[in-house]
Image: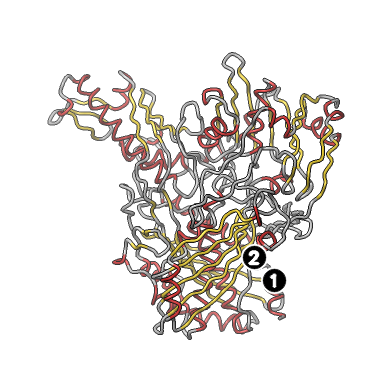
Amino acid sequence: MNAPAKLGQSIARREDQRFLTGRGRYTDDTAPAGTLAVLFVRSPHAHARLAGIDAAAALASPGVEAVYTASDLVADRVGHLPAVSEIKDEAGNRHREPQHLPMPPGKVRHVGDIVAMVIADTLDQARDAAEALVIDYEELPAVVTAAQALAPGAPLVHDDVPGNLMCRWGKGDRAATDAAFARAAHVSTLSIRSPRQVVHYMETRAAWSAYDLADDLVTVTLSSQGVQIPHRLMCERVLNVPKDKLRLITEDVGGGFGPKYPISAESTLIAWATRKLKRGLRWVCERGDHSLSDSHARDLSASADLALDADGRFIGLRVRAQANYGAYVSMFAPTIPTTGLAKVISGLYRIPTIRIDFDCAFSNTVPVDAIRGAGKPETLLLLERLVDLAAQETGRTPVELRRLNLLRADEMPYAAASGYTYDAADCVRLFEIALKEADETGFAARRAASEAAGKRRGLGFSCHLHGTGGIADEHVIVQASADGLVARVGTQSQGQGHETVFAQMLSDALDVPVDRIEVRQGDTRSIPRGGGTGGSSSTIISGTTLKRAADVLIQRGRDLAAERLETAPADIVYRDGSFEIVGTDRRVGLFELAAWKPFDGDAVFADKIESFPTGVMVCEVEVDAETGTTRIDRLLAVADCGVVVNPRLLDGQMHGGIVHGLGNAMMEEAVYDEETGQLLSGTLMDYALPRAEDVPSFEVETISTASPNNFMGLKGVGELPTNGAPAALVNAVLDALRPLGVRHIDMPLTPHKVWKALQR
């Protein structure tokens, strides 16, 4: 696009040309010839002592360069893979965080734990050598659910963590909540289990490395959601090397969704082994290992009580939950189920008092961490199911009860009882738009038509939100030269369209053609500071910082232009891509000035308060009671996204988020054998993902209430529909089945589970 772009304009994605023509630069595409192949040998047991590893035969195998085990890490004093977030119990004690080395010494704690690293000339040679390893395991009893792990006398995942209790976490005024329940006219109670889930991106995790002998520099190129945090942790906490001796690079990424954010054992081991061997290495996670190694999500069991007064108004909410953290504390994991729940448990409703109690457990499963939604989809499922149940029990419709309790625009900003402040929204307007666009008044006729055809039709609602922006580390540099602008950002695109959006925002700020702007990311040498991408926050974090950097660029350019035009800086204004002397026709273009003397502008992220996008989703389904099959007939999402930068890309984020949430609700579940700890859904033959035929042609509507919490009024949106879709679909299915006596079904709502519920 050779003209300036404006905010709110639907310009096409710039990066799609190379993606659609096979010219993307994904991690394994860029690996040079001559790198050694890496194979990670993983534990086949969920819980076992490592009595010994004999690597002699493996080391003698053809082509093998090295075999490393945990003893090598201990000898080199390789450190623990740390969490960067924390929670504390109400006495102020930090969560328990046992040692997590990239290869655990002495004991494995889940199927997939790395026990050896085999390096050979080819991958086939590495596989042959791995077969020659003699590993002596002493199997131990395993626990795979939070309930199992927290039961008295349960086997300990970590010997130094009594009762497998990672933390007992609580939030909210217990006394005030108890008082509200004491005066309640009605209390509705519901228990749910949100299943464990796995993200299956198209590009699995991968890494390759190079060693520069002259500078003693290790460079690792990896598929990630941002290189700066892993770089800092590797250098300061795990490998203990100077920051200028390790460089991390990420180019194109084929999907992230959360698991490519944390520091990983594999990339850390590749950086470590590269320095030891002084040779380049190459690794690609095989699809079969993906479900055994990449962080999982959800796995929450919760009960909640909703107190209502005689008029049907919500007066209190209690939540008791057990969160399964898996075998170790992953990088962001402490806050995902806990503060993730607290942040949105009020939904879009007025709830004066809330109490939350969590038991957080270790188990012999893959660690959980942030995955699209990060604690919010399961929370909003619990709340929205409870609202529907309360409506049923008090003789109201779901629409009536929601209308009675939705927050009004004049109540914003709203200080929720769980400790978070919702910045700006018009929840009533959102809901009314959704009802109108979904033709809620015509539902009765559609239900009658379905029943005449032998099917059950249901209508479900979800009122939802997400927290975006807030605390983050970002430093943006915008460099001007004769060739154009280069913007260096500390976030990392994984398909969202950052190159387009950031160029569009900079084009709007500086009034220069989009084609003259290049966006660079993913290199700790040229962009040492940044927080990566997660939490639907990149447009807020990098976007607002880009605008500030553009303002600095203009100010520095004014000084240069004054020198070039031989006048005072106060006489210079910036307009239409040029610096000009006020009241004259004397001017110098931005790029002409930069050709004379290149200059730049930089800024750090400053808007440290979160913004909250809000949404309402309406889902309409038909259920075949004979087979349990559910067909989504209609789905409407209405979202308040703040100031919209690019409507076309916004629609793409909404579409992807909806499908992700529907997949979670309908079919996705990571299933472990509760006796052996074996993952039973470790392949795509056993773990179902949504396909085009599973989802309808849905409708997306947006409104814009600017956030006061950043100067551009932005709100992130990528996870918002994922938060709302599960509750809308589950409520719709249960609305269809309610006349048949079905009160609740836990996700995923597979045909078998629906059919089974109808047989009771």
Q: Nearer the viewer, residue 700 or 303?
A: 303
Instruction: Give the crowd class for mark 1: few <14, some 14-19, many >=20 residues within 10 Å.
Output: some
Task: Please state if 30 lies on the left or on the right of 288 as rendered.
Answer: left
* Circle number at residue 158: none
Picture quadrant of residue 406: bottom left
Q: Which quadrant would the C terminus be assigned to in this image?
A: bottom right
Q: Is the C-beta separation of discs 2 and 1 under 8 Å? A: yes
Residue positioned most to the left: 583
Check disc 1 and give the amino acid type: Lys
Above or below residue 555? Residue 307 is below
Say above or below: 465 vs 223.
below
Which of the labelled discs sits on residue 753, or is there none?
Answer: 1
Q: Earlier in the sequence, mark 2 or mark 1?
A: 2
State the colouring used for the structure image: secondary structure
Per the image, the residue denoted by label 2 is 748
* Residue occupying image coordinates x 40% and y 78%: 313
Q: Amino acid at mark 2?
A: Pro
Other residues around mark 2 within 10 Å, as few (<14) / some (14–19) / many (≥20): many
Q: Position of residue 666 (x, y in %)?
A: 63, 64
Residue 438's place in the image compared with 375, above or below, is: below
